[in-house]
Image: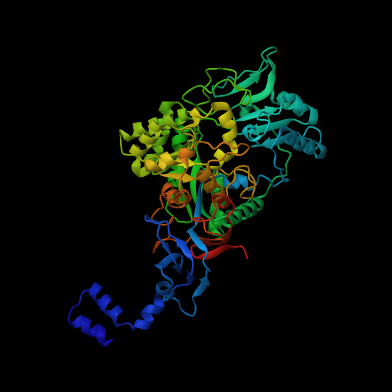
Amino acid sequence: MRLLLLLQAIRVRPAAAIALLCASIPLGEAQTANRADLILYNGKIVTVQDNFEIVQAVAVKGDRIAALGSDSEVRELASPETRSIDLRGKTVLPGLMDSHVHSTGASMYEFDHMVPEMETIEDVLAYVQSRADVLDDGDWIRVRQVFITRLRDQRYPTREELDRVAPKNPVYFSTGPDASLNSLALKLSGIDKDFRITDGKPGRIERDPQTGEPTGIIRSAGRFVVYESSEKSPSRADRLRRLKELLADYNKVGLTSVADRNASDSAVELYRELKERNELTCRVFLSVSVSAQDSMERIEARIRTAASNPLHEYDNMLWLRGIKTFLDGGMLTGSAYMLKPWGVSKVYSIDDPEYRGMRYIEPGKLFQIAKLALEHKLQPTSHSVGDGAVHALIDAYEEINNSFPVREGRPCITHCNFMTPEAIDRMADLGIVADLQPAWLERDGATLMKHFGSARLDFFQPYKSLFAKNVVVGGGSDHMQKIGGRRSINPYNPFFGMWVTLTRQPRWTDKVLHPEQRITREQAIRLYTINNAYLMFQEKEKGSLEKGKLADLIVLDRDILTCPIDQVKSIQVEQTYLGGKLVYSAN
């Protein structure tokens, strides 16, 4: 009280008064206020800062990093209440991030029944027959996301093969935008010799050149399949429970942040409810789905609605910050939009030598959608697999840049598997970021080499070239099916993805896919940490271990920087912390 009266008497300014008062607090009390809640020491803390500094210990206060440094420096912040953990030399990384997931759908993939791994046509037919054996006649059987490039046979099951194992059930073998149907599925959908696509939207029905009858293979025409699910319907409680289970498995493989790149309104609500319950164990960055086939009026309304959603206000747990469209087809189905023709192929059922794939958004509309998104502070991205689609999206962003700089909005290209040196240079100039899926190189590289040859794959997932030009690229999975980091059809274990970028070794072959595009271990770690944080506009909040940043970190069972390279894909996470809270422990 006497100090306050004295300050008033000498008219000390408020800020100075506060400083004097703080100085008057006994030193012990000040130190107590700065004590850490958690300290990890005697470890190898890989900070992923600009200089990739490695320290011994890290301290956490609340949900933030309070200090990093030597054991002696950091342990000075300990109090009797501090939880101190001896790492015994273990390696610590920042929490890992996935730049591209579809968690709400993936979590429900096996809700009705378990789906076995399928590597051959015989596996597919055995599964279809097993479903026919337990379903009633007339019930639909759907096989989803078993891509032909990931079957050793490298082809679709034929209409006749599907008829043989399920003659009394309509069968829908769907691989993204394309599918193979049996005779009953074609009949129920009205797809016969006389059927024609007349709605003006993309699509093609493969036909027997002799008879004109549909072969069963349809491209970008799933909207015509009159599919009726025979699987049990989940309740909202089921969806929330399964989503929590998947997020827990993300934590198990070291993920603390994910970007849902095509979130429906219902998906947004599931995340929102988990957040309100304080049950989100991953930070989620949302890009809401926008159908480019809608009218511009409806698209503009969708973008405005997203921008006015309360979740568009920044929150480090759940942030609606982007939109997603589909510009082309896929490399797994022979429908990616390419600069040069695909070439005739039995694997992809391509008989037109001039066929370049499928493009779904014309240039003017693509420009309008991306510009609207950027004007509403929503990051635009579009599924763009082929080099033709990549160039088309860059063209749109470049045109917008003539009106206002796009760099601050970090416009994104999703997938961009096939690239060119020109595309990389233009992305660097404009500040365009990229969301890539390394696992696809391992899963599909052998098929792609067989079809395209080595020369045309010079810039397939060119990680080294992207880093050399300072294009910020993030590692993702496009996880769509199953719970399980390596058993999912698009594996989401980030250490597997890192291993792919280090080796570029496709399965089912001893040929490395352009080893000159390999990157270093430090760069591979950046793909899943600070680079992904940048893609999500949060590099100042997470992605590296620095004082003041969120305390998202993981403890590994081996040293990722020194272990044999083939062990990188087998690294196990022992502990995962989200904001300083333990969300996964192997023990």
Q: Nearer the viewer, residue 478 or 239?
A: 478
Colour approach in the figure: rainbow
As drawn, which residue projects farthest toward the left?
Answer: 10
Q: Quadrant of the C terminus?
A: bottom right
Quadrant assignment, res 446 = top right
Quadrant for residue 35, please give it. Answer: bottom left
Q: Is residue 13 above or below residue 387?
A: below
Q: Residue at x 45, y 41 (%)?
A: 463
Q: How far from the left and from the top, in percent, is residue 257?
A: 50, 53
In the rendered image, residue 388, in percent from the top left (x then y), is placed at: 46, 27
The quarter of the rendered structure image containing the N terminus is bottom left
Confirm whether residue 191 shows in the render.
no
Q: Is residue 262 above or below residue 419?
A: below
Q: Position of residue 456 (x, y in %)?
A: 49, 28
The one nearer the camera, 209 or 569, is: 569
Q: In this orientation, which residue lies closer to the viewer: 82 or 288?
A: 82
Residue 342 seen by the camera: yes
Above or below 227: residue 532: below
> Would residue 23 be found to the left or right of residue 287 on screen?
left
Q: Residue 529's spot in the image, x, y percent?
A: 46, 52
Looking at this view, name the residue that lies furthest to the bottom: 2
Please name the residue shown 68% across and 14% down the image.
212
